[in-house]
Amino acid sequence: MKIFIVAFRRWGNRISLAYKLVPTCYIIWLFILGHRLIFYNISTGKCTAQTGTYARFDSFFEVIMSGLCPPIILLVLGTLLIRSIRRVMYRRVVPIGGVADNTIINRSVLQQIDAQLSVMVLMQTFTAIPSFVPYGAELLYSNLSQNWYKSPLRRAWEAVGIETIHLLSYFFFSTRYVILNQRWNLSKVDH
């Protein structure tokens, strides 16, 4: 297993791989979102999906891509980051013949970084969930209820709710996450 990990790291630490991954990511996202270039119409100054089956597909696609994927991706990548930091912390080698004070200090610094990263990732995830999930639910509700009869009062309340949800979705992008450490006075980690 360790041989596989070492080989994977050697394979992944190449600049040529990065040069290949950038256009690959571009092409993948073009395939994922390219249907909008074909099936969207500009009418009354707005760019909207064509009516019918594609409009329903596009609404569900938007709910998944905007409402569910970001929190799930943040949770998975955050968990992998914490796991990686903890592996580095436990791989520290103690010199033969005794424990060096420097190793204890480094372990203490790594434990502080681990604790702060854990809190930061949890806060980022807990900020992402109320920012993205209500937006996805609002998109789903708006698309499913667009043909329902609604009184003017209900439409007004829905408009207030929709604007509130849109403001909540901006909350994630306006927050900052900071790591404080003894070694570095202030290192900012923004998303």
Image: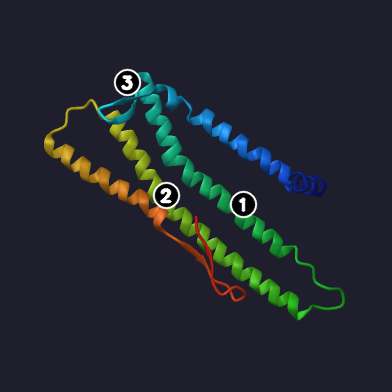
Q: Position of residue 32 (x, y in %)?
A: 51, 30
Badge 1 is on which residue? 80
User: Is residue 121 left or right of 7 when viewed as pictured?
Assistant: left
Colouring chosen for the image of the structure: rainbow
Q: Which mark is residue 45?
A: none
Q: Position of residue 40 (x, y in %)?
A: 37, 25
Where disc 1 sits, the SS reads helix
Badge 2 is on which residue? 129
Q: Nearer the viewer, mark 3 or mark 2?
A: 3
Q: Position of residue 83 (x, y in %)?
A: 64, 56
Identity of the residue furthest to the bottom in this view: 101
Instruction: Please state which amino acid type lies under the numbered disc 2.
Output: Ile
Where disc 2 sits, the SS reads helix
For the point 64% across and 72% down, the residue is 109
Badge 3 is on which residue? 51
How much space separates mark 3 and mark 2, taking CA atoms?
30 Å
Identity of the residue furthest to the right in this view: 97
Sequence-first disc among 3 and 2: 3
Label 3 crowd bin: few (<14), some (14–19), many (20+), radius 10 Å: few
